[in-house]
């Protein structure tokens, strides 16, 4: 992404007809389009201040209407898909039929709740037990971790005499992200609970190398690591002994390639060969949700020529190219899309989150955002508007009235929920990421806002909804995101937010065999009325009405939007986060790949409406560093034009100024007598 992308952002001009009628309005510096004003009154002009060297406070400017200036949502024709491709998850065989140790079967049943093998496990476990190099392709959420973990532990526990941790690493598992490394380590710890001489360990970036070296001196039997940290230890740590590695597992290989780890994996394989763990003595297993030329190239670096392919999908006739690839999704996954006008994106998101968490039992969801700045901003913003406030203090009648008025001003929409909000992205410290990952995984309900760092490999139990607030660049990325729900036979739902200009993305997904149903945005907003609690009769003030009595959906949605905007205006730090999030989103949108420009084109954006979806009242030209300079330049130009017009209308002023200059010039050279 080009960090220096020019953000010379301006709102769209008025129509040609209105421009002919009112040509003077071109000089006005508006924050919203003319048709969005609720009042035609203009605020008095204030003296110009210098903004150089200081941050301007959030502007209190004109509040544009939420429901004007939006286009009608078109209805798409029914999808033309011959057959949607689903992959059968479970087989009819149990783990007892897989020639595994009875203790391991017991651990699988009691600790992991697994009795039947999935289809990929049924196909791959016998091949891995036979000692052949294997490439495994399977959809997300199909149990790929157990596919390689069970046979490896089975073989290692059979070795006699029993191996000790001091002999060095016997199995090396390389994963792309820290969260996946921690998750794989926890699964291995549960599987080896009955085999105490098999000791798993984990290395991830962000941890202290000194503590990892101390654990390495004690020894591991099975090591899980990210590529960068493992390569660092192989280069700098003397007691990093990999000479006896019998198993090399490359998990989520396609994700590793996306993150640019191909060179690191090649160096790791070379280091293993140099230490004596050659490919002839080592069994390599590669797992990926998609197999393309890049994954094949990575397999050529680590696997032997005589390798086995395991494809859990039943479609053997699909094309190998990415453009014609038919993608797999679980048959227990319901997929939707929401066609939302830009100005309504934020309130529709809040309504969807609040209604699902409060009115149904589907209380655990992930919200995928485009950038880290969006995650950092939307998490506190949604929490400020939707999370319940503590107002249990009692006081006198007058004080109670004042408190009610203050509460009404603070919470305009009247929506109070008990939703917990979490955030996760790659720029957080390792301690923060680990704490969030473990906490969200264990809580019965909550909302996790995240980037694509959570889109691969993570097994988050009982996630009911996946919300893609920003569309991913490719259909493959879409499949990985929705794969965080409907895992291992459980039901799940996914919805993606699209603007009217982006609806071609639905057709693109249909070309890959993915069918999405349309969710009505107006029905989502209707849920807001059910979220407003009715006040009991004794608590109501004389002459007042219940918050939800006689209120329209438009009024409640507008109040919710005003509450978001008020939170941004009242908090300078939140306003700064909002500006950063908006600028980062614009830059992300401009960086969509060329193939996606047909439906994600920067020129199709109405930047003013999207600024409102970030609860910003600032004009787009004022948001961000470059926009600020443009705004200051425009202000100087406008001031210069006003001064010129004033002099033209008052010619006497120019004459007096010239006479004064002549007088000063004469006095400078006068003799003084």
Image (spheres, rainbow, N blue to C red):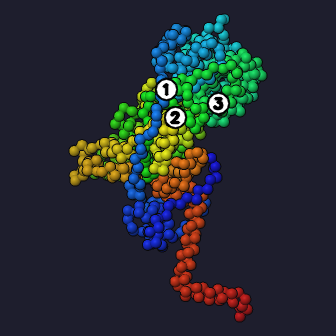
Pointer 1 local density, CA inside 10 Å: few below 14, some 14–19, many at least 20: some
User: Which residue is found at the position 34% from the left and 36% from the top?
Assistant: 359
Sequence order check, earlier mark of 1 and 2: 1
Residue toward you, 37 or 71: 71
Left or right of 389 in this view: 141:
right
- Locate residue 386, reporting x and y percent: 40, 43
Find residue 137 and name its label.
none
Quarter of the figure that contains the C terminus: bottom right
Give the distance between the C-alpha atoms of the residues marked 1 and 2, in whole angstroms: 13 Å
Kindly check if marks 2 and 3 are in contact, taking CB atoms under 8 A apart as contact: no
Q: Residue furthest bottom?
A: 673
Q: For the residue labelled by badge 2, is the local secondary structure a helix, a strand or a loop?
A: helix
User: Which residue is found at the position 55% from the left and 14% from the top?
Assistant: 193
User: Which residue is found at the position 61% from the left and 19% from the top?
Assistant: 200
Residue toward you, 283 or 382: 283
Q: Residue furthest right?
A: 274
Find residue 295 and name its label.
3
Reading the image, the residue beneath label 1 is 87
Instruction: Name the front one of labels 1 and 2.
Output: 1
Q: Is residue 366 visible?
A: no
Sequence order check, earlier mark of 3 and 1: 1
User: Which residue is found at the position 72% from the left and 29% from the top?
Assistant: 266
- Locate residue 451, reporting x and y percent: 54, 39
Sequence order check, earlier mark of 2 and 3: 3
Reading the image, the residue beneath label 2 is 479
């Amino acid at each position: 992404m080009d960090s220096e992308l020019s953000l010379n952002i301006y709102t769209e001009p008025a129509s040609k007809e209105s421009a002919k009628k009112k040509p003077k309005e071109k000089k006005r510096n508006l924050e919203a389009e003319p048709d969005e004003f609720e009042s035609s009154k203009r605020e008095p002009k204030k003296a110009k201040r210098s903004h150089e060297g200081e941050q301007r406070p959030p502007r209190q400017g004109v509040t544009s209407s939420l429901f004007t200036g939006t286009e009608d949502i078109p209805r798409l024709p029914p999808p033309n898909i011959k057959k949607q491709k689903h992959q059968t998850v479970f087989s009819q065989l149990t783990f007892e039929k897989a020639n595994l140790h009875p203790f391991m079967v017991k651990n699988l049943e009691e600790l992991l709740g697994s009795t039947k093998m999935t289809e990929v496990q049924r196909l791959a476990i016998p091949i891995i037990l036979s000692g052949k190099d294997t490439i495994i392709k399977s959809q997300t959420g199909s149990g790929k971790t157990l596919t390689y973990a069970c046979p490896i532990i089975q073989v290692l526990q059979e070795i006699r005499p029993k191996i000790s941790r001091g002999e060095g690493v016997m199995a090396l598992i390389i994963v792309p992200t820290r969260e996946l490394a921690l998750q794989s380590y926890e699964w291995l710890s549960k599987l080896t609970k009955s085999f105490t001489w098999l000791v798993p360990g984990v290395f991830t970036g962000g941890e202290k190398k000194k503590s990892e070296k101390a654990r390495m001196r004690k020894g591991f039997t099975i090591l899980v690591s990210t590529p960068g940290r493992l390569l660092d230890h192989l280069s700098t740590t003397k007691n990093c002994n990999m000479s006896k590695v019998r198993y090399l597992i490359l998990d989520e290989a396609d994700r590793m390639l996306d993150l640019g780890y191909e060179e690191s994996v090649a160096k790791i394989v070379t280091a293993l060969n140099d230490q004596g763990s050659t490919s002839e003595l080592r069994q390599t297993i590669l797992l990926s949700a998609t197999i393309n030329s890049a994954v094949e190239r990575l397999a050529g670096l680590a696997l032997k020529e005589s390798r086995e392919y395991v494809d859990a999908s039943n479609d053997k006739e699909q094309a190998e190219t990415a453009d014609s690839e038919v993608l797999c999704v679980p048959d227990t996954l319901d997929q939707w899309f929401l066609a939302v006008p830009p100005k309504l994106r934020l309130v529709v998101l809040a309504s969807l989150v609040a209604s699902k968490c409060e009115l149904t039992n589907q209380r655990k969801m992930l919200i995928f955002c485009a950038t880290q700045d969006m995650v950092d901003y939307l998490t506190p913003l949604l929490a400020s508007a939707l999370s319940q406030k503590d107002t249990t203090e009692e006081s006198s009648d007058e004080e109670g009235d004042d408190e009610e008025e203050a509460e009404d001003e603070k919470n305009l929409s009247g929506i109070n929920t008990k939703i917990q909000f979490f955030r996760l992205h790659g720029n957080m410290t390792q301690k923060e990421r680990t704490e969030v990952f473990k906490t969200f995984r264990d809580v019965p309900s909550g909302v996790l806002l995240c980037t694509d760092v959570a889109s691969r490999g993570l097994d988050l139990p009982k996630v009911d909804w996946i919300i893609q607030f920003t569309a991913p660049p490719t259909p493959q990325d879409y499949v990985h995101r929705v794969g965080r729900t409907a895992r291992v036979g459980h039901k799940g739902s996914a919805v993606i937010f699209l603007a009217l200009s982006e609806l071609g993305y639905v057709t693109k997904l249909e070309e890959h065999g993915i069918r999405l149903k349309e969710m009505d945005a107006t029905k989502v907003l209707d849920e807001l009325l059910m979220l407003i609690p009715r006040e009991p009769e004794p608590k109501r003030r004389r002459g007042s009405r219940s918050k939800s009595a006689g209120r329209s959906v438009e009024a409640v949605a507008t109040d919710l939007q005003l509450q978001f905007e008020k939170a941004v205006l009242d908090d300078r730090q939140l306003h700064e986060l909002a500006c950063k999030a908006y600028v980062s989103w614009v830059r992300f949108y401009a960086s969509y790949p060329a193939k996606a420009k047909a439906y994600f084109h920067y020129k199709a954006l109405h930047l003013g409406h999207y600024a409102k979806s970030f609860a910003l009242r600032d004009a787009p030209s004022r948001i961000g560093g470059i926009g600020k300079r443009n705004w200051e330049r425009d202000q100087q130009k406008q001031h210069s034009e006003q001064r010129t017009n004033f002099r033209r209308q008052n010619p006497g002023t120019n004459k007096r100024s010239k006479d004064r200059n002549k007088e000063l010039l004469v006095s400078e050279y006068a003799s003084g007598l």
